[in-house]
Image (tube, rainbow, N blue to C red):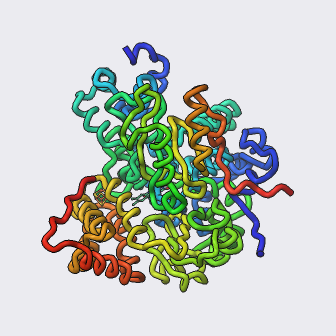
Amino acid sequence: MLIDRFKNEVEDILSRYPVKRSALLPLLNLAQREEGFVSESAMKEIAKVLGLTPAQVFETVTFYTMFNLKPIGKFHLQVCKSLMCALVGSDEVVVWIQKKLGIAQGQTTADNLFTLSVVECLGSCGTGPMMQVNDDYYEQLSEEKVGRVLDDLKRDGTCSLKTGPFMYPQPLAK
Amino acid sequence: MATYEKILLKNMEQPGYTGSLADYEGTGGYRALRTVLRDMQPDQVIEVVKKSGLRGRGGAGFPTGVKWGFIPKNHPGPKYLCCNADESEPGTFKDRQLMERDPHQMLEGMAITCFAIGAQTAYIYIRGEFRLGAKILEQALQEAYAAGYLGNNILGSGLTINIYVHLGAGAYICGEETALLESLEGKRGMPRFKPPFPATHGLYQNPTVVNNVETMANIPHIINRGGEWYASIGSPPKSCGTRVFCLSGHVKRPGNYETPMGITFRELIYDLGGGMRSDKPLKAFIPGGASAPFLTPDHLDVKMDFESVALAGSMLGSGGVTVMEEGTNMVWAALRLMEFFYHESCGKCTPCREGTSWLVQTLQRIWNKRGRPEDVGVLDELCGNIPGRTVCAFGDAAVSPIVSTLLHWRGEYEALIREAQETMPRNKEIPVFTP
Ligand SMILES: Cc1cc2nc3c(=O)[nH]c(=O)nc-3n(C[C@H](O)[C@H](O)[C@H](O)COP(=O)(O)O)c2cc1C
Ligand code: SF4
């Protein structure tokens, strides 16, 4: 059981709020972190912990786009397509990925490694085009850079091109 | 090029500055919190912030000290502070930098705010995608607790202040303050009717202040250097202080630029941003995030303060400036933003839920050269029927890309429709919209 396995973390989360239901999003985030999506059994468990009905949990889950109700690939590629990124070429990024991986928007590769989504603004408008892969941002993408990210992820499970603590433009060296 | 003293980005732009507690303390960090706890009463803090003229940096520009003053003094239950780190207005990416590069600056501001309004508990509602920011804030919180700046009996004052990070899960509307509260209560993030306002009926129906990250980050500096000092920067009396403007689009050097309010768009785009990225001239810009109506090259000398931008027919909003070069089709640009608003409408109000869907369908039809002569009128009518008829300001914001592009570039709509009429076979079914 998810809740039992992460007893300490769950208790820490619950201790932060005077009203239990506030812990719903954090617990759902935890469930998705562990299973890659929010399963029905996780929703039921969480409902029980918070004293909610499963329907109350479900109605909340479906409001938020970040929760996946179905399993997805190991790496979730989310390309921003909002205007600011589109001005600097985000539609091409989608095409590059489609070409390289052979999947369309909403699809997962046969090896279950990559799922491609096209999403709205991720707060990186000055450094577009960009994509988020799981927890990490990759910005100022070029076709070559996208290729490297996908190769690295496939080979090593991680890629050094991800953005660290954000600052842009970098201050000029004095 | 004029140089400006930076306030919020100053530390992080020092070589080697990491944003750790030691680095922050090394630049005088947490001095303001000490001063406040040692020498000031909550009311005095509110007075200083009122005097500073600081207005909220989240979009609406409400005077911060005034907002704090609305919190009832003798409320029997708890009071709360929520820091709005949802940053999801397209064109805006400043809070991300403020949180990831100098987290203690905003934490100190939050602690001082808690003291001023009498809150013991504060939440940072951070958008779900900002995992790195949340991690950096968690680390900074640990440092601040260990150093006695947070927790029980902070700095020996007897006061308790706890701050928690709360991750959202991908919904633009949760940046609207009452939707944020609903979401923080574990519900669907749908805005509440106002009044009552959060100041009296906020989180768990208790008095609550919601303030933006950048607003919070200003507080320590105002305490250290005084309300008068802050009020002398920028365009007093209405637009005091600096802002971190986010520059994006077709410019050479996009990014975050902190300047006093009141510089012109021309200075931001051409001096700081290096001008257009290619030899194509500027055609249009959005002055304050996706919710702000488009402006034209004629507006380049408008001053970047709240009043001047409003007079020009738009708003300074969240400070996100997006630049578009000649050749960018304005119907396409409006459609891209409309798709965003359609996707993000929470669905509570019929005009916004149905209206955004209709607007997207109509725009798609026009852009795909299937438009009908009456479609421009349809857009006009729809845009006239959403604003002012909804629970939250999203409804007003959602129509601004269309209203403003119709105002300045109506010919581009008409040209696409003319083309459709010339090329479309008669009586052909209009394609049905699939989201
Ligand atoms: C649709 C909508 C989205 C908003 N998104 C944000 C946001 O992402 N971040 C933010 O700080 N304020 C946002 N706001 C403004 C908040 O409602 C609120 O005014 C602000 O957080 C108050 O803080 P301030 O006074 O420090 O600006 C949004 C408002 C609306 C209507
Ligand atoms: S205006 Fe739109 S986003 Fe705001 S409450 Fe109504 S439906 Fe929701």
| Quadrant in which residue B427 is drawn | bottom left
Q: Is residue A77 visible?
A: yes
Q: In the drawing, does residue A131 fall left or right of residue B372?
A: right
Q: In the drawing, does residue B190 fall left or right of residue B279?
A: left
Residue in the foreground of this view, choosing between B337 and A40: B337
Spot occupied by residue A27 in the image (x, y as percentages of width and height): 40, 28
Q: In the drawing, does residue B2 fall left or right of residue B308?
A: right
Spot occupied by residue A138 in the image (x, y as percentages of width and height): 58, 44
The residue positioned 38% from the left and 43% from the top of the image is A105
Residue in the foreground of this view, choosing between B340 and B387: B340
Q: Quadrant of the N terminus of chain B?
A: bottom right
> Where in the image, quadrant-wise, is ligand 1 located?
bottom left
Residue in the foreground of this view, choosing between B184 and B113: B184
| Quadrant in which residue B111 is drawn | top right
The residue positioned 23% from the left and 64% from the top of the image is B358
* Up-down relation of residue A90 to residue A61 (above or below): below
The residue positioned 77% from the left and 39% from the top of the image is B22
Spot occupied by residue A30 in the image (x, y as percentages of width and height): 44, 27
Residue in the foreground of this view, choosing between B216 and B355: B355
The residue positioned 57% from the left and 43% from the top of the image is A146
* Up-down relation of residue B279 to residue B319 (above or below): below
